[in-house]
Image: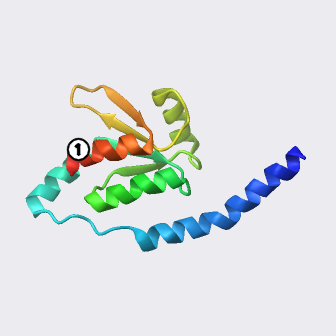
């Protein structure tokens, strides 16, 4: 019975993943308008950020949409397919859970922020 349930959910993921990715592409909002100088400042601030994510995770999609709406060019690191990113997430953040925003502060310390709502609120407060 356990094997049947496992294969059911794997099959469900195979069917739903392309639908979720197409839906993300079709429903991603337009970026906010900024002057070139303002956008350059935002791009510079984004160099200290990295989003650890899975491509088809609905919570990661939620964060990527907010990033697109705010016009942020944050590096995306796939912790599902890249073992180095998965290891960095485990060692730095303490657990392999996505989405996770890695924030490198000016003093050199790193902050690992989990939960899509928390990440979106921080992005909106910082760049909104």
User: What is the x, y in percent for residue 126?
Assistant: 22, 44
Q: Is residue 6 left or right of residue 117?
A: right
Image height of 69 relative to 57, above or below: below
Q: Is residue 30 left or right of residue 87?
A: left
**Which corner quadrant of the image does residue 18 belong to?**
bottom right
Q: Is residue 60 left or right of residue 48?
A: right
**Residue nearer the viewer, 104 or 8:** 8
Residue sitting at x 29%, y 69%? 30
Image height of 2 relative to 96, above or below: below
Residue sitting at x 43%, y 55%? 62
The local crowd at label 1, few if under 14, some if 14 to 19, many if 20 or more residues have their Cα within 10 Å, is few
Image height of 61 relative to 15, above or below: above
Q: Read off the residue under disc 1.
A: 125
Residue sitting at x 49%, y 34%? 88
Residue sitting at x 47%, y 57%? 61
User: What is the x, y in percent for residue 14?
Assistant: 69, 63
Identify the element where label 1 is drawn: helix
Furthest residue in direction bottom, as rendered: 26
Q: Is residue 25 left or right of residue 31?
A: right
């Amino acid at each position: 019975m356990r094997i049947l349930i496992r294969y059911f959910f794997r099959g469900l993921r195979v069917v739903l993943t392309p639908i979720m990715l197409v839906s993300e592409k079709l429903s991603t909002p337009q970026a906010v308008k900024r002057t070139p100088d303002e956008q350059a400042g935002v791009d510079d601030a984004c160099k200290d950020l990295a989003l650890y994510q899975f491509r088809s995770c609905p919570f990661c999609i939620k964060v990527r949409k907010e990033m697109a709406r705010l016009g942020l060019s944050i590096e995306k690191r796939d912790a599902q397919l890249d073992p180095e990113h998965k290891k960095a997430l485990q060692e730095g953040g303490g657990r392999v859970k996505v989405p996770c925003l890695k924030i490198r502060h000016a003093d050199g310390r790193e902050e690992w922020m989990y939960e899509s709502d928390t990440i979106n609120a921080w992005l909106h407060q910082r760049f909104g």
